[in-house]
Amino acid sequence: MASRRAGEKLIVAGRVCVNGRAVTALGGRVDPAHDRVTVDGVLARAKRKLYVALNKPAGYVCSRKDEAQRRAIGDLLPREWDNLYSVGRLDYDSEGLIFLTNDGEFSLRLTHPRYGVRKKYLASVAGRVEQETLNQIVRGVVHGGERLKAEKARLLSANNSNSLVELEMAEGKNREVRRLFESQGMAVNRLVRTQVGKIKLGELPSGKWRTLTAAEIKSLISQSL
């Protein structure tokens, strides 16, 4: 019936009632299965929660629509799922696994650093990456006034023109993987997120989506407890 911020304004204005009583304090809890919530006298119904895994292609922004008319991941989903939002972000040029949901608590548990849900990436880096570079990335660097680090970094292959590195990250700071390599004077040519928690990208084709199973949802939540 409203976005979260608009909903807060409705509550403060006294337009929301729970079981017939107006509620004006933010942060109150209700049980959708037992409590009756109305807005201006109209019954509010809980929407079915959806959890979707998408293989984001490069050249898409992580939003439903884009004011600059760039392609958005919302374009890859059914129109009726216009209430889904991405769980975290992948930058415009990056690819791979990203979740979309209408469950705010699920999204928080997967994105807030205090829950420590790990994410894996494959980075194709221009030039030969030396082991000392990976050691430095794991120790941590300061870039743009922020401390950045990988939890793990493993060299999969390397030659003088290109290296393939697998990284495991605990936080989701803006362009963190790319900035880690930039701090070492190196450029990431391609970046693919391959895993979030225990959920792997697997064989999901680029631009395609699938719904998460109940077991997968449970595993992601349990990892964040």
Image: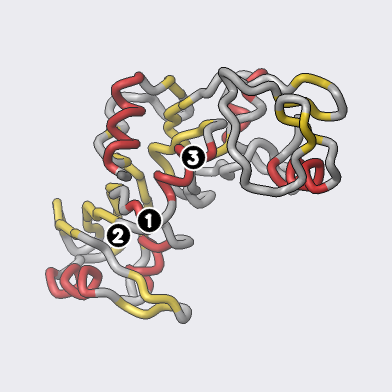
Task: Find numbered disc 2 in the image and state the secondary structure of the residue it sits on.
Answer: strand
Residue at coordinates 80% horizontally, 48% vertically from top-left? 12
How is the protein colored in the picture?
A: secondary structure
Which badge, 3 or 2, comes first in the chain's sequence? Answer: 3
Residue type, mark 2 in image: Val
How far apart, in angstroms, are the residues tagged by discs 3 and 2?
35 Å
Circles 3 and 1 in contact, beta carbons < 8 Å: no
Q: Position of residue 175 (x, y in %)?
A: 45, 61
Question: Badge 3 is on which residue?
Answer: 105
Q: Position of residue 160 (x, y in %)?
A: 19, 64
Label of residue 148 in the image: none
Task: Find numbered disc 3 in the image and state the secondary structure of the residue it sits on.
Answer: helix
Residue type, mark 3 in image: Glu
Above or below, 91 against 1 in this view is below
- Give 103 or 178, whichever is nearer the viewer: 103
Nearest to the eye among marks 3 and 2: give it. 3
Question: Badge 2 is on which residue?
Answer: 125
Question: Badge 1 is on which residue?
Answer: 189
Residue at coordinates 76% horizontally, 29% vertically from top-left? 1
Badge 1 crowding class, 10 Å Cα cut-off, few under 14, some 14 to 19, many 20 or more, is some
- The answer to whether residue 169 is seen in the rendering is yes
Task: Find numbered disc 1 in the image and state the secondary structure of the residue it sits on.
Answer: strand
Which badge, 3 or 1, comes first in the chain's sequence? Answer: 3
- Give 67 or 150, whichever is nearer the viewer: 150
Above or below, 144 against 194 in this view is below
Q: Position of residue 205 (x, y in %)?
A: 38, 25
Q: Position of residue 37 (x, y in %)?
A: 71, 26
Q: Is residue 155 left or right of residue 97?
A: left
Above or below, 205 against 188 in this view is above
Badge 2 crowding class, 10 Å Cα cut-off, few under 14, some 14 to 19, many 20 or more, is many
